[in-house]
Amino acid sequence: MGTTAVKRQSSRWPTLRDAAATLFAERGYHATSMRDLAAATAMTPGAIYFHVASKQALLLAVYEEGVQRILDRVEAAVAVEREPWARLEKAIAAHLESILDASAYARVVIRILPTDALEISAQLTQLRDRYESRFARYFSAVPLPRDRDAGIARRALLGAMNWTPVWYKEGGKAVPTVARELLAPLRALAGVKPPRGRK
Amino acid sequence: MGTTAVKRQSSRWPTLRDAAATLFAERGYHATSMRDLAAATAMTPGAIYFHVASKQALLLAVYEEGVQRILDRVEAAVAVEREPWARLEKAIAAHLESILDASAYARVVIRILPTDALEISAQLTQLRDRYESRFARYFSAVPLPRDRDAGIARRALLGAMNWTPVWYKEGGKAVPTVARELLAPLRALAGVKPPRGRK
Amino acid sequence: MGTTAVKRQSSRWPTLRDAAATLFAERGYHATSMRDLAAATAMTPGAIYFHVASKQALLLAVYEEGVQRILDRVEAAVAVEREPWARLEKAIAAHLESILDASAYARVVIRILPTDALEISAQLTQLRDRYESRFARYFSAVPLPRDRDAGIARRALLGAMNWTPVWYKEGGKAVPTVARELLAPLRALAGVKPPRGRK
Amino acid sequence: MGTTAVKRQSSRWPTLRDAAATLFAERGYHATSMRDLAAATAMTPGAIYFHVASKQALLLAVYEEGVQRILDRVEAAVAVEREPWARLEKAIAAHLESILDASAYARVVIRILPTDALEISAQLTQLRDRYESRFARYFSAVPLPRDRDAGIARRALLGAMNWTPVWYKEGGKAVPTVARELLAPLRALAGVKPPRGRK
DNA sequence: CATGAATGAGTTTTCATTCAT
DNA sequence: CATGAATGAAAACTCATTCAT
């Protein structure tokens, strides 16, 4: 368990990927040029291509990391919970934290559409699906009235979650509170009262 | 009904604006070139500049029209309804119809972010707000429990609505049904039963 | 039959194609940059792309014209001749004149290999074949001893012809004389005496 | 036969030169990048520069080796022959074997023009001439009719030989047979019958 | 000997825009 | 109204080469 193993990882690749995540999330894929990326990382444009083969490959790497980060966070948050509603709420909160915090990776997954990079759109779609199917698992564990359309409800919740970067301001309501509020209508629909305690 | 009124408006401006709406909605702003637009309208690139001063101005025009179309549709749908829940449901359905039908104008408003065109981002934001504030009016007319955050609920609903282009397939559930499903959780939250009748 | 018809042909395209022929023939395809071409035609690099879609397309256009010019010249030269040996000699002379004169088009066809532009290599090969099959027609009309391999003889002659740009100096022997010299060994092989008269 | 002599020459220089020969012959000089070379030899681009000072120097080395290999082969083939026609035929066959076999060195000499690398073009030309003058020696030993131009005949033969890589397919006629066919017309010109025996 | 990393000038190509006709 | 032609800047990417370690 020494600290030595990681050492010789060329230090600029994480920096580059981070910068790409930030710029892609802020400006979008097409509005971010390789020059912008170079400037943001104090590299020459050519040097970028030592670390990554193309702009599309860079997007793919960011996307992969973004999905992984959401998944990791959600899984960690959900680990201790047995009760379906509480588990779903934790998953929502973890998802929101992923897409609202400073690290832009998760935001890229939401903002950049697979069609933005045609040659890798299939892979991007697959990555998106990888997360959504996990989310669907947590969602389907909560019981909804049979005369409601659970598929629509699930997508509505996802849409509500993914819209938060548009309006959420830091310093506002705490993220777990937002998660609870997003879930409250569904709880009502199922006839479940939200628990009392904060967080 | 003389011949004079209609005469000079025969130009290709509507064609151009339509094509811009379609391409901006499908590919995004930056991924659509003026040449693409020219090809789609059988014009030369130069001819476009007779009708519009710049690409940004074109986006602005599409955006304006997009917002206007949603507003018109929503207002028309809402006109006959007095009851707040029914009115909100009608508004939602009209909004969904706007962003899901073939005309791409409304979809542009949802897909293209104000930051995609920095010099007109303020105007784009203002246009978005123009619609959202109207929507907020209908939303605030329905009574929600005081311990819930109505602002979050409203944005959640908007997010759920704007996410529909991602997943909605033609030939699936009818749009008004989707609207009802989107609203059902909130109705439950307020302790209101959805009405029986179809549509 | 007026002179008017040709007029509005944008005057820069022939210039561009000529320059491409010259530079491709002199330096090769890869060693000629679009900038070189721009400089040689007093255009901006961008302007080139108004006339042609890509560097490969430009090569293809030059190749086509090159093959066409050889074919035209050869056909014209051969038109009046009935006698097979005389006809073949005329064809050789016309071919040599094509690849040795100032216009570089024909030289491009000899110098640039189809593999130099992978995406159009099939088309380039086809163009080459178009000429070679014509040449084969004139060649096969002359009777060679049955114990010799006519296929090898034909390719040897073609190789000998296409090698001339490597060594031929202007001011040396006249081109028709070179043609006669190239053909002399084959005539001898067939037991035919070359005709007396000059040219 | 001590251990010292062979020691230090174990390096990857021959591998590198071989790879350069192959790639230069197949794709051409400009179409082959130092990275291609690195990939083909499992070296890093930097490592190449330990063995060779520049791409041009590498070409020069390949060229030198190419000419040397043809010369060696031709000389060996010619050694036992006294009779001029037989000697020339052996020289042709050896030349053809050089440029048609798997080792690409000789093919580089034919394919790459001195003008492809301006700074060493004089040296490349000199190397070419070194072989051609040797060939000229064997050629001039055969007696041709005085009214024919021997210079043209020699270059025609060389052109015919150097064109073979364009059309020769393995599994076709044996190389010595091709050599005999190439020489047959000249023999006829001189009034000489080719010998009967195979090879 | 070799490599990982970088450089800087170069490549082909695209873009929004302009303008004489 | 429209077009053919062009511009100049910028795009993504490649290249031969260098160098600290």
Image: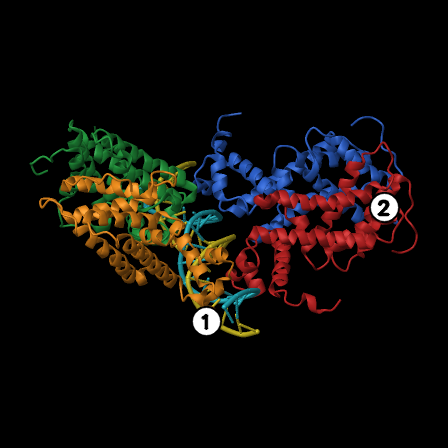
Chain colours: A green, B orange, C red, D blue, E yellow, F cyan
- Residue at the disc numbered 1: B2
Indicate left or right for A69 with E17 as reference: left
User: Quadrant location of residue A58?
Assistant: top left
Question: What is the quadrant of the N terminus of chain C in the image?
Answer: bottom right
Within-10-Å neighbours for mark 2: few <14, some 14–19, many 20+: many
Q: Position of residue D91 (x, y in %)?
A: 74, 36
Give me the residue at 29% from left, 47% from top: B93
Q: Nearer the viewer, residue D172 or D107?
A: D172
Mark 2 chain: C
Q: Nearer the viewer, residue B64 or C42?
A: B64
Kind of element beneath mark 2: helix
| Amino acid at circle 2 | Ala
| Amino acid at circle 1 | Gly
Indicate left or right for B44 with C188 as reference: left
Q: Any mark on residue C184, and which?
A: 2
User: Quadrant location of residue D183?
Assistant: top right
Give me the residue at 82% from left, 40% from top: C140
Question: What is the quadrant of the C terminus of chain C in the image?
Answer: bottom right
